[in-house]
Image (cartoon, rainbow, N blue to C red):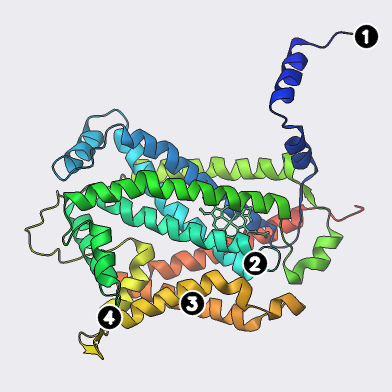
Amino acid sequence: MASPSRTDRLAAWLEERVPIAPVRDNLSHKTVPTHRYTVCYYLGSMTLFFFMVQVVTGILLMLYYRPSAGEAFESVEFLMTTVPFGWLIRSIHSWSANLMVFFAFLHLATVYWMKAYRPPRELTWVTGCVLLFLAMGFGFSGYLLPWNQLAFFATKVGTDIAGAVPIVGETLLRFLRGGDQVTGGTLSRFYGWHVAILPAITVMLLGLHLIMVQIQGMSVPPGQKEEAKRRRPMRFFPEFALRDAFGWTLALGVLATLAALFPWELGEKADPFAPAYADIKPEWYFMFMFQTLKLVPGGEVAGVEYEAIPILLFGLAGLLLVLVPFLDRRVQRDGRSPIFTAAGLVAIVFIVTMTAWGYHSPVPLYVVLLTIVLMAVLSWGTARGEKEVGS
Ligand code: HEM
């Protein structure tokens, strides 16, 4: 008998110390159901891709960035003008941040639509919701870091909104700002959140989210059970993984194109004594809340500012979103829950209308329509490509 090769011996040595065979076996047996909406299963991993891009480009940015009111703007300016490819890394980081939030929203919408939060996936949903909130927290904290006019005033307004929450508002505002005003202290604090606290929590939750997905496998939407039975499931490795890799390659191309053709702007350095910026805009994913609050008149009732009412309602909506798997009881009985589907549609119409209103532009509506058409075309194309059992 031929003696084992050097590679086999090294593999056996490693296996004895780090046994990865069970993981490999698990992956080689894992399958993904195929049906009309299989394409939705790629959206979580797309979000994951953009998160990984954020980690890599974020670390590179940290090598040059200085988190103080006196140096932050200048360090980003230096990065954009002098450091080789610095402008590209910063642009990729900014574009990828937006795409990550967009795909997290889309992933949530399709998971909701497919009712994948049904038992036993309640905790996968809950951790997913918190991941989305964390992604928004990354956006909010990162926005201030270049210390430019737009970011400065948007953060002032954003933290003022937190200050309007009844009872805890003042404490919350001081906690966020690290004082009464937005200052260099706020910048250092936001930097801490952005590069240490949020990433640590995100990585832990993401780990949990992915472990649960691995243990439970992918769910089949209630209306697709028959089709999934007729069709041969796809092996995760290599078929599904290769399709994921294809999507990631495409995403990298799109990201590089966007970053090269539309480099992220820097604007002017923040001046705390300048009159408030006329056209304050938050990140697009906060726009629907910002616009709703703009419509509320000044004044108060029973010591509570009018503004606090929509803020509390948004908080309640966030809580209800997290609790969806526990509230939607009917879906557990017969896989249908038209009230929840309708509530989801109303939420999307509200968010898109308010965002379009906030920007005085129909573009948000076009983006949603285009996404729906693209998803429909991809579902149609991929469903046709898969074989039926026995064929
Ligand atoms: C940083 C954000 C997130 C990342 C990186 C992520 C990643 C993933 C990945 C890779 C999968 C497996 C493939 C797939 O279904 O697409 C998955 C599944 C899942 N995710 Fe997420 N996710 C994120 C946010 C969310 C959000 C916001 C929700 C909803 C609240 C959510 C709920 C779920 C559920 C329920 C599944 C299981 C789907 C099924 O079995 O059909 N995730 N996630």
Mark 1 and mark 3 in contact (Cβ < 8 Å)?
Answer: no
The residue that label 4 is drawn on is: 307
Mark in the foreground, 2 or 3: 2
- The reply to whether residue 32 is visible in this rendering is yes
Q: CA distance from mark 2 to mark 3?
A: 18 Å
Q: Quadrant of residue 114?
A: bottom right
Q: Name the secondary structure under disc 4.
A: loop
Residue type highlighted by circle 3? Ala
Residue type highlighted by circle 4? Glu
Q: Quadrant of residue 334?
A: bottom right
Q: CA distance from mark 2 to mark 1?
A: 53 Å
As rendered, which of 4 and 85 lies closer to the eye? 4
Q: Position of residue 125 (x, y in %)?
A: 59, 63
Q: Position of residue 342 (x, y in %)?
A: 58, 81
Residue type highlighted by circle 2? Tyr
The residue that label 3 is drawn on is: 347
Compared across the picture, whether 252 is left or right of 245 comes to: left
The residue that label 1 is drawn on is: 1
As rendered, which of 110 and 324 lies closer to the eye? 324
